[in-house]
Image (tube, rainbow, N blue to C red):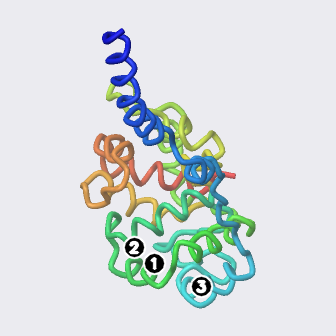
Amino acid sequence: MKLLTSFLLAASLAAPAFSTFAQEAKPAAPQAQAVAEPVTAAKPDLAKGEASFTAVCAACHAPDGNSVIPVNPKLAQQHPAYLVKQLQEFKSGKRANPIMVGMATMLSDQDMLNVAYWLNSKTAKPGFAKDKELVALGERIYRGGIADRQIPACAGCHSPNGAGIPAQYPRLSGQHADYMVVQLTSFRDDVRKNSLQMTGVAAKLNDREIKAVADYIAGLR
């Protein structure tokens, strides 16, 4: 009888402790609901995008994103995710460019989204190749790479017609050759540091090959 009494007393003392542990281990219902609620993604506002672009970007990239200055890229019809990434990296300093750092600093993340989607809605104007002697070499490299030097074909990532792959690789079709030469050289010389993949590819190209690829890209349709 004494043994049974002792067991019941011990059980009664342990019960509150077990109850407290159970309450602490069980997640609070409001917190669980808060975690489960989906996060609403920001939506682009094209009208505000046009206004921001006109105020900050149009002087260098033209009112419709089709830059007429050979060293400034055409931005019309570019993939929004790529544009947002570049603007964010200009703003953070990951992609170095004194002019673009200043411009990007004036834009919020929402501004960047608005501008990027507005630019994507504009039609890119075609370009053209200038150097007939080099364009054949550029085509060979762009479409087939250089196997014996382990240089991959540009078309593998940027597509045969230069349309790129949304959210991964930028559209190149019709881009200014002068701009492309600067960017490929910057990747090769480790000046532009925001794409390890492009640094690795460009590191294997000489000046003539870079110029050839850039000229071919300018004429892609």
* Label whose residue precedes the other's in the sequence (1 or 3): 3
* Label whose residue precedes the other's in the sequence (1 or 2): 2
Name the residue beneath numbered marker 1: 104
The structure residue drawn at horizontal position 54% and vertical position 87%, both measured from the top left corner, is 56
Which of the 4 image quadrants contains residue 57?
Answer: bottom right
* Label whose residue precedes the other's in the sequence (2 or 3): 3
10 Å crowding of disc 1: few (<14), some (14-19), many (20+): many
Q: Position of residue 63 (x, y in %)?
A: 66, 83
Compare residues 20 and 15 and report the one nearer the observer. Answer: 15
Q: Amino acid at mark 3?
A: Ala
The structure residue drawn at horizontal position 52% and vertical position 69%, both measured from the top left corner, is 73
The reply to whether callout 1 and callout 2 are in contact (CB within 8 Å) is yes
- Classify mark 1: helix, strand or loop: helix
Name the residue beneath numbered marker 3: 58
The structure residue drawn at horizontal position 45% and vertical position 83%, both measured from the top left corner, is 103
The quarter of the picture where the N terminus appears is top left
Relative side of 200 to 140, left or right: left
How far apart, in angstroms, are the residues tagged by discs 1 and 3?
13 Å
Q: Position of residue 2 (x, y in %)?
A: 31, 12
